[in-house]
Amino acid sequence: MTTTRDDTPLWLFADQLGPAVHGGEHAHRDVVLIEATSALAKRRYHRQKLHLILSALRHAERDLGDRATLIKADTYTDGLERVKRPVLVHQPTSHAAERFVHRLHERGLVAEVLPTPTFALPRADFETWAGNRTRFRMEDFYRDQRRRFGVLMNGAEPVGNRWNYDEDNREPPPKKQSRLDVPAPYKPREDDIDAQVRRDLDTMNLDTVGADGPRLFAVTPAEAKRALRRFIDHRLDLFGRFEDAMMSQDWAMSHSLLSVPLNLGVLHPLDAVEAAEAAYRDNRAPLSAVEGFIRQILGWREYMWHLYWHFGPDYRKNNALDARTKLPKWWTDLDADAVTANCLHHALQGVHDRGWTHHIQRLMILGSHALQRGYRPDELTEWFATAFVDGFRWVMPTNVIGMSQHADGGLLATKPYTSGGAYIAKMSDHCGDCAFDPKKRLGDDACPFTAGYWAFTHRHRDRLAKNMRTRRAVSSMERLGDLDAVLEQESARDRF
């Protein structure tokens, strides 16, 4: 419980816009919202990301009515000084923002800083769980989360007597169809607020990337509820089976598209988890799909949040594989037309058009390519955080540094996640009409992922040979008769 005066206003960041923050014990308070121009211009963000942020803030002002005051200022400090009295705020969601809030507290602009209410597990409880661990396994954390919150449990045992149905959720895309046979995802209806946001962004003339497209994601609690219900009632049933598959003509497939409202704080993770479990209990969705969805939210998402804080601000400096290649311009400009490989083209096009791709495209296409080519992990982390509409500052370090790029040397993941073209050929419909052949590692039509896999394995052979999960790749590489030619080819490759 807060000890701050009852008439102290509550300041909301743009990712704290749900009732978990401004409702409950704070439902009586006035609310302060700040549009800080300097924050919008600080980095080269995706145009649609900026639209979502401004739309969320302005819709919050409308929905909160007389409680809310939206201040447009150059900086947050300028905005707070116009409030004329100290404000109450919840812990922000990045190291830099937390330091900033504490400076504001020292200056008297912030009266009190409260714990973050937009995640299931409090930060202090995670630190108790982490204890003196030096190696972390998501599965351990996930099982404890299930027990703690009583999710998909029959007493002390998991429903179905299995904790994890990941092996049941790896089906390739169905043959002879270009789209998954599933109803379309929820799409919000743009209104006058969105129209004004678009006009204002045009006037600001900010340096952005990506297309200005229709708003695809929920930004209010009401929209988030509709998006969740649409997913649970019409799309969850097929989610698990095909969650790792990729289809050229179906960017959303059966994914929930809830990461934006979750990261804006307008949808609480436990609400999503409880809705999914209810679908299973009511025989409206199979256990494998429900468990897979719950694992993403109550497991992985919470895990990434807590490890971000546990590892600290220096974690993003890790570069255990000594990756030094700067991100190429076609990558940072989201120029998909500069890319030949179908899989990479579609992933980059998705980022350009929507600021979003699903998790396998992030990990096994974009991330795998970056890992194979030795792109700098700090630059890659920044790119994911700014080019993706759900890429808030806390999300990307552990996902990119730890999971995708193995730049922490194995603190988070037990092996680097990369593959040759065979995996992409199996899990997508991209390879059939691609100019590159996933079976070839040498020649003009050699797949850059297949050849790149062997070049990466050779570059890090000593490290990989010591890892039980990757030593077989080194043994296979040593048996390649054309390895020298492949390495020479990849060292000069400028076409992907």
Image: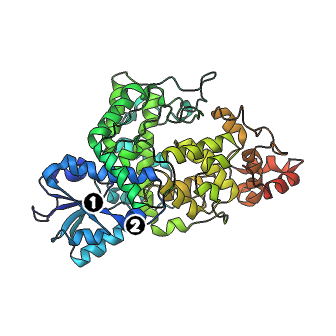
Question: At 43% across and 39% down in the image, what residue appears?
Answer: 257
- Residue situated in front as seen by the camera: 45 or 276: 45
Left or right: 305 in relation to 431: left
**Residue 488 seen in render:** yes
- Residue situated in front as seen by the camera: 273 or 71: 71
- Residue situated in front as seen by the camera: 474 or 430: 430
Question: At 35% across and 71% down in the image, what residue appears?
Answer: 99
The location of residue 350, given as percent across then percent down, is: 54, 43
Q: Amino acid at mark 2?
A: His
Badge 1: few (under 14), some or many (20 or more) residues near its Cα, within 10 Å? few
The location of residue 162, given as percent across then percent down, is: 47, 33
Give above or below for 370 relative to 251.
Answer: below
Q: Earlier in the sequence, mark 2 or mark 1?
A: 2
- Mark 2: which secondary structure? helix
The residue to which callout 1 is attached is: 115
Question: Number of numbered discs present?
Answer: 2
